Image (cartoon, coloured by chain):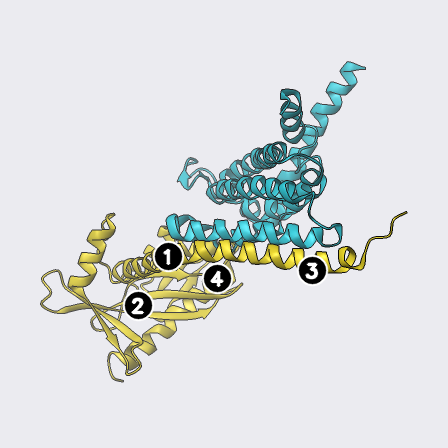
Amino acid sequence: MPAFKVKKVFTDDLGANNPVFAQVLGICSTLAVTNVLRNTVVMCVGLIFVTALSNMTVSLLRTYMPSRVRMMVETLIIASYVIIVDIVLKAFLPDVSRQLGPYAGLIITNCIIMGRTEAFALSNPPGLSFLDGIASGIGYSYVLIAIAIARELMGSGSIWGYHVLGDWWTNWSIMVMAPGAFFMLAIFIWIVKGATSKEEGGKK
Amino acid sequence: MKKESLAKRRVFPVVFMLAITLVFISITTVIYTYTKDQIALNERLRLKQAVLYSAGVPLPDNPVEIERIYDERVNEVKDDTGLVKYFAVKSPDSQYVQSYVVLRTGAGLWGEITAAVGFNKELTNFTGLEVLAQNETPGLGGRIGEAWFKEQFQGKRPPLTTVPEGDPTGDNQFQAITGASYSTAAIKDIMNKSQEYARMEIGGQ
């Protein structure tokens, strides 16, 4: 696997082609889980696992898969890995499973996974597809973690459940609700777009 | 241009889909079979923790200790069909019953909430609450599972009422969760109705 291809996969998915702020994928879970940092981290780990393995599996089957049924096959593969994540959490990390509640099973609805299998795994070898899944997952994760830190801090005065802001802080309830997620995501995209357009302006 | 045969066009996709489905169902079935005992054990331990916590019994961290305390001090009272009606929790020296715990389910915002509700032996005051299952919004209604919320109910007397802001001063008041009025109301409802159930099943009224 050429090193330059691996580097391109990672730089694309973490930067210019980021699934959240560039491709605007996975927004539902970005809004839903980022009010609590711990849930966000678990969702991110689950997503990296599912995306990487789904990408690799679809890539392994790509030469045999009829195009008529490719989306059904991809959905089946993704759903199977999500079920495995759910079962493993319930068996070995029951507290985490309880915290995450229905969101573990909702990983299947994350369009990043289907998006990467369609856009990358179908036309690339398994090893590179696996790495693309990991890179996409990491690109998704750092955006969500940044948003979650801000939302939990302002909405609950805590990070990872530990109170860091004293009694002087009045919790912004809106940060724990959906509108807060919209605001934080929009601010994040604004900052990134602003920084990248300044870079492009400087280069010209 | 060579036309695809009927077999390749129609039959192969169906066969492929069936084969892939069989493979992945088999994999998930094997993993489920391998872990189902562990999952059942986790759920059973969770129930025991909930019963002890809502009865006001201090909980150790060690699961083996939790099992030991449960076996020594909790008596499961069942009906004719074998379903548990309530739990009678004995004192540390096992000489008398110090509290009772009932499991109740009520409607939450997104689904049902199941809780273990503890009462003193006279069934007049709550000894504690533990939420066993809920699908409320994480960070909002989901906060009914947090320690600060559950601890409010220790020693309170039904029927409960909520205090939206400020500290609850009455012995039947508890603080609501901001932005989660439905979830808070669901807990209030479950706890208020649980006394009636407890009196009927335990008190024989």
Task: Nearest to the eye among marks 4 and 1: give it.
Answer: 1
| Residue B64 placement (x, y as % from top left) | 21, 52
| Chain letter of the residue beneath label 1 in the structure image | B
Is the Cβ of the residue at disc 2 closer than 8 Å to that at disc 3?
A: no
| Residue B30 placement (x, y as % from top left) | 45, 55
| Residue B21 placement (x, y as % from top left) | 59, 57
Under mark 3, the amino acid is Val
Q: Are marks 4 and 1 on the same chain?
A: yes
Q: Which mark is residue B183?
A: 4
Under mark 2, the amino acid is Arg
Circle nearer the N terminus (4, 2) = 2
| Chain letter of the residue beneath label 4 in the structure image | B
Q: Which mark is residue B14?
A: 3
Circle nearer the N terminus (3, 4) = 3
**Badge 1: residue crowd in 10 Å (few <14, some 14–19, many ≥20):** many
The span from disc 4 to disc 1 (Cα, nearest Å) is 27 Å
**Badge 3: residue crowd in 10 Å (few <14, some 14–19, many ≥20):** some
